[in-house]
Amino acid sequence: MGSSSSRNAEASQRRYLIGTLTKKSCVEQKFFGLSQLIDLKCTSQSKGSTGKGNNYDHNGVKAQDRDHMDLCNTNGATLYKPMPLNKPLYASETFVNWKSHYDIERMQMKLMQRKTAVYLVPIGSFPSFVMDFKLNMSGKVCSLFEILGTFLEIFYQEMPVSWLDSVDPEKENWNITTRNHKVTGKRQYLVSDFYPQLKKWKPKNTYGILGLTWTDLYPTESLNFVLGEASKRHRSGVISFGRFEPKTFDPEKSRDIEDIDPIIMWKLLKVSSHELGHLFGLSHCDFFLCGMNGSSSVEEAMLQPLFFCPVCIRKLQYACKFDIVKRYTELRQFFTELNGAMPFDRLQQCVEWLDSCLDFLLNDK
């Protein structure tokens, strides 16, 4: 009797975590079933992030463990690494928890006007090497902005992504608070000042808007620096190139960005996909090493996975209505082309992970 009750309780927790999957396709059930990797009985005092100083590969696997894991294992257990739960399930953002809030917001949007697009907007000026950057991806010459837009349109599939013309916050009298950081001496924008301005700037059919600025950002007067932030309430956010992080700044050794190299490209892909996730109502992930994990430094953020976990993808698919296999197939093509044009170990790891993921999804075993 006790064990049956225990099983029922766990089944109820699983449904609260990932929702009911009975109407999902076999492939979707298989993918979202990976949420069973989470030990719902496990608790920990860890902070729910990958942790400073840990060396993780793209998949969120510690480098020293990678040799012991077969990324092509068709049972899917190696695709994601679960984190120990550090709080009760009801206190975490499960799919059911997220959906209850999202459905209310969606009802409000239906009463007003259907939101059908995400917009990106350059904020202020950029150096010539940013504006003139071109990359030949399988015969198509793309600018930095085109690459970023293409990636986000695939990542947030079925939600069109478009660039608006550049906006100068000073000419538009946005009154953005600025400061020169006491350690770096470099100019920074207060990121939250952008939220209401971008909300007013976005077109009427916009689900959300994300700005990109060359100037570094800070979140509050008491905090040093942030790569990007987004406001779910305003459906707007801003990301930066993260040029001068005070935590690692060395006045003798630190140099400004001088070209778009693979590390800068990776940073922009990581930060933009993460912050857009917040605009869809996703909080920082507590369940897996995941693209929606929180971080406390640029180094930690760059070492975390790019791709979202099954729980976060469940939310995203509910919002965007994409086909799982089609999305991962197009992501594989994108990263194959990008890595071919700009070889980088983390881009190669993306291709390998996507191969393994598609093998798992399409393999009947």
Image (spheres, rainbow, N blue to C red):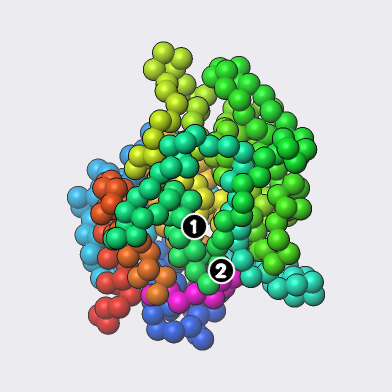
Tag nearer the camera, 1 or 2: 1
Q: In the depicted view, which residue is nearer to us: 295 or 341?
A: 341
Q: Residue 88: x, y in percent? A: 58, 56
* Residue drawn 50% across the image and 28% down it: 245
Predominant secondary structure, magenta span: helix
* Residue drawn 38% across the image and 48% down it: 134
| Apparent side of residue 276 relative to residue 300 in the rendered image (left or right) | right
Classify 10 Å Cα crowding around label 2: few (below 14), some (14-19), many (20 and above): some
N-terminal of the pair, mark 1 or mark 2, is 1
Q: In which quarter of the image is residue 69?
A: bottom left
Give the residue pinned by disc 2: 159
* Element type where label 2 sits in the image: loop
Does the image show residue 274? yes
- Residue 316: within the magenta? yes
- The correct choice, above or below, for 217 with respect to 355 in the image is above
Give the residue pinned by disc 1: 149
Quadrant containing the C terminus in the rendered view: bottom left
